């Protein structure tokens, strides 16, 4: 198969490139490095099965030759990433998704849209099932990401209904692992880098917000199962192991032993950084379990150890 991955130099995109090349496929990765990095592709760069195109898919998306699949991951994805790049985020979700869908339509390729648990906003249903329509503040600071991804889902479904494109939609919940950007501001790189540097671990507010963290290899496995399946409705992929942010800080501290001397501190970030911060998040993965036969395998302590090992190589 020959597969285009937009956002291929990002955290998840780079793991997808590696996995697909390892399975013997040809990968074309596209990225403008707004939040991704060339370093993420160092391990696949020399492969004869790998091609890289530096481009902003909001402006342009063209690939020579046949394609069997398009996986559209191009977008800033961390709260700091999208709050610092609001217009680029909206353009990636709207113009970018349109351009990527056009490539899939013209090449008769199947299309997978990387969507997000953020489409549920600050959810009133818990855990979140795919049939929940969400609770998004459409004019809040996070709306640049949430609404762009909701639009991306809408246009993906419209391409399926109008042109018969074989579309798939994955709703990705919090994912972590090696190659997360050190300074992207998310809770995992923040806490892990703080633990590695023996700096205070900064729990925002009272640490009672909940998340559930999925290791990247599990996520990639679910993504590929969905891509090759026949399922056209959105599928949640994430780890349902819900915990408070404070409990997560304690888990990072424990995974950093022996050696981690960080204190866990409560910290008030600037108000716009936490506006509309979802208070509870946990995927209902019944659909992924039954349709894809998927479930997460990597336990949090093991995933955190691997992530800490990676951060030790990049933190100075
Ligand atoms: N958070 C925190 N300390 C940090 C960074 C984030 O307590 O240094 C909290 C944040 O307020 C949120 C949760 O951790 O409740 C997850 O935030 P993240 O930025 O990872 O992304 P989100 O899951 O909101 O997309």
Image (spheres, rainbow, N blue to C red):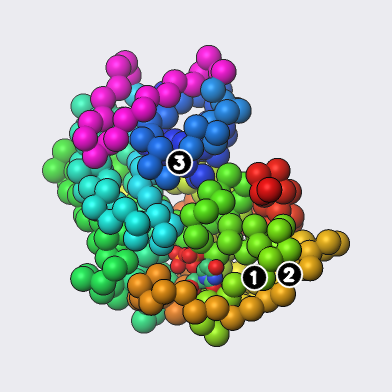
Task: Determine whether label 2 and label 3 are within 8 Å by CB.
Answer: no
Quadrant of res 260: bottom right
The residue lying furthest to the left in this view is 162
* Residue placed under numbered mark 2 in the picture: 262
The answer to whether the beta carbon of the residue marked 2 is less than 8 Å from any atom of ligand 1 is: no
Measured along the vertical axis of the image, is residue 201 above or below residue 76? below
Of the image marks 3 and 1, the number of the one nearer the N terminus: 3
Magenta residue check for 62: yes
Q: Residue at x 22, y 70 (%)?
A: 138
The answer to whether the beta carbon of the residue marked 1 is less than 8 Å from any atom of ligand 1 is: yes
Q: Is residue 50 left or right of residue 179?
A: left
Q: Residue at x 38, y 42 (%)?
A: 34
Q: Mark 2, residues whose alpha carbon is within 10 Å: few (<14), some, or many (≥20)? A: some
Of the image marks 2 and 3, the number of the one nearer the N terminus: 3
Instruction: Measure how far apart labels 1 and 2 are at the Cα level.
Output: 6 Å
Measured along the vertical axis of the image, is residue 111 above or below residue 213? above
Q: Position of residue 154 (x, y in %)?
A: 21, 54
* Residue placed under numbered mark 1 in the picture: 201
Q: Residue at x 68, y 48 (%)?
A: 316
The residue lying furthest to the right in this view is 258
Q: Is residue 66 left or right of residue 223?
A: left
Residues shaded magenta: 46-66
Of the image marks 1 and 2, the number of the one nearer the N terminus: 1
Measured along the vertical axis of the image, is residue 52 above or below residue 84? above
Which element carries disc 1, helix, strand or loop? strand
Task: Determine whether label 1 and label 2 are within 8 Å by CB.
Answer: yes
Residue 36: mark in rendering: 3
Quadrant where the N terminus is found in the figure:
top left
Which element carries disc 3, helix, strand or loop? loop
The answer to whether residue 299 of the structure is visible from this angle is no
Q: Nearer the viewer, mark 2 or mark 3?
A: 2
How would you classify the magenta stretch by its main secondary structure? loop
């Amino acid at each position: 198969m020959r597969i285009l991955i937009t956002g291929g130099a990002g955290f998840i995109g780079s793991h997808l490139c590696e996995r697909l090349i390892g399975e013997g496929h040809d990968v074309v990765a596209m990225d403008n490095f707004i939040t991704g990095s060339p370093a993420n592709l160092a391990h696949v760069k020399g492969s004869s099965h790998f091609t890289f195109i530096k481009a902003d898919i909001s402006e342009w998306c063209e690939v020579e030759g046949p394609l069997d699949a398009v996986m559209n991951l191009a977008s800033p994805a961390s709260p700091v990433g999208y709050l610092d790049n609001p217009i680029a985020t909206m353009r990636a979700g709207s113009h970018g998704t349109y351009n990527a869908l056009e490539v899939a339509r013209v090449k008769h390729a199947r299309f997978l849209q990387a969507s997000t648990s953020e489409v549920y906003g600050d959810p009133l249903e818990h855990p979140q099932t795919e049939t929940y329509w969400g609770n998004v503040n459409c004019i809040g600071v996070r709306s640049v990401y949430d609404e762009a991804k909701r639009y991306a889902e809408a246009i993906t479904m419209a391409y399926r209904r109008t042109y018969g494109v074989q579309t798939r939609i994955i709703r990705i919940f919090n994912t972590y692992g090696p190659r997360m950007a050190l300074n992207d501001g998310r809770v995992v790189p923040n806490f892990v880098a703080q633990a590695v540097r023996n700096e205070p671990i900064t729990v925002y507010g009272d640490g009672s917000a909940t998340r559930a963290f999925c290791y990247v290899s599990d996520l990639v496995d679910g993504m590929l199962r969905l891509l090759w399946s026949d399922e056209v409705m959105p599928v949640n992929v994430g780890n349902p192991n819900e915990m408070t942010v404070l409990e997560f800080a304690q888990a990072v501290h424990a995974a950093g032993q022996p050696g981690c001397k960080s204190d866990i501190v409560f910290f008030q970030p600037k108000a716009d950084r936490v506006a509309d911060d979802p208070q509870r998040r946990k995927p209902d993965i019944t659909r992924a379990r039954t349709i894809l036969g998927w479930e997460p395998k990597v336990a949090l302590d093991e995933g955190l150890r691997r992530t800490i090992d990676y951060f030790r190589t990049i933190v100075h």
